[in-house]
Image (spheres, grey):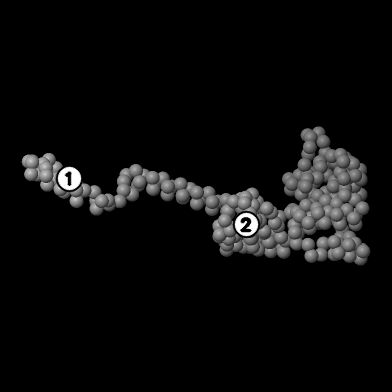
Amino acid sequence: MQTGPHIGEREREILTAIVETFIATGEPVGSRTLARANREGLSPATIRNVMADLSDAGLLEQPHTSAGRVPTTEAYRYYVEQLTGKARLSDEDENIIQDSLHGISDVQEFMERTSHVLSLISHNVGVAVAIGGPKNALEHVYFSRLGDQKVLAVLVTRSGLVRDRVLRLDLPQTELDAAARFINENFRGWTMEALRTELARRLEQERSEYDRLMASVEQLYRQGALAGDDTAQVVYVEGAANLVAGEQDRQRLQELLKT
């Protein structure tokens, strides 16, 4: 779980007030509004200074120059993880969650079921967003040829989730097995983001090295390096006119050509 930026107690209280006020009103929150509701009697100037610090921390933003502040996405996450109380689920809700999500390994099905459960127990709109993290790491990948132009890709993460997708590719199973073996041997335990970044880098490096190699081969070829030694297949003829110096020689040449 993310701990969020480190802020003091006063900043935490003002951030909580801003988030809750903005949720209730939908309008940017100003320092005067907070000062009127503040139980400690803080002045608008003091609150403005705190709001400036929260803005520097990436927790608040100002939509317009003359407007108040609104929470950022990071502020909402910090509010949920750090500032709200830990409410305990009822036994009924816990049973609903366990019964609904038990045994699901497919990512898409898990997220769809999660949003449904959230809506069911909150009696409101349920939203589930898959956020990549350290647990979103590769365990192994498998490719299977389904037929012409179709390949099944199965990806298993270390957290036990399974992703499958049908790709439009025309590759033999031997090449698919080699690709899966390469990925599993080189990238097991890597997060998907790091895997994609490193794989793209390696492919670009290999392509550059291949291009340089082919350029060198082309130059060698054009300079005759691949011509080889074909002297055994070449007959050098010199002084052929001497074969037919006279009538008798012409007869010998005819006999030679018949053999």
Residue 37 seen from this side = yes
Where is the N terminus found, in terms of image quarters? Answer: bottom right
- 233 vs 180, left or right, is left
Q: Position of residue 23 (x, y in %)?
A: 87, 45
| Callout 1 touching callout 2 (CB < 8 Å) | no
Q: Quarter of the image holding residue 27?
A: top right
* Amino acid type, residue under disc 2 in the picture: Arg
Report the residue at 14% width, 42% height from top: 240
* Amino acid type, residue under disc 1 in the picture: Val
Q: How far, Cα to Cα, is label 1 from label 2?
A: 60 Å
| Residue 54 vertical placement versus 179 (above, below) | above
Q: Position of residue 106 (x, y in %)?
A: 75, 59
Q: Label 2: few (<14), some or many (≥20) within 10 Å?
A: many
Q: Which mark is residue 57?
A: none
Q: Position of residue 211 (x, y in %)?
A: 46, 47
Which callout, 1 or 2, points at the residue further toward the start of the chain? 2
Tell me the element at label 2.
strand
The residue that disc 2 covers is: 145
Q: Position of residue 131 (x, y in %)?
A: 74, 54
Report the residue at 68% width, 61% height from top: 156
Tell me the element at label 1.
loop
Q: Quarter of the image holding residue 44?
A: top right
In the image, which is nearer the foreground, mark 1 or mark 2?
1
- 118 vs 172, left or right, is right
Work out whether residue 186 or residue 167 is closer to the camera in this orientation and state it. 167
Work out whether residue 121 or residue 154 is closer to the camera in this orientation and state it. 154
Report the residue at 77% width, 47% height from top: 73
Q: Which mark is residue 237?
A: 1
Report the residue at 81% width, 64% height from top: 102
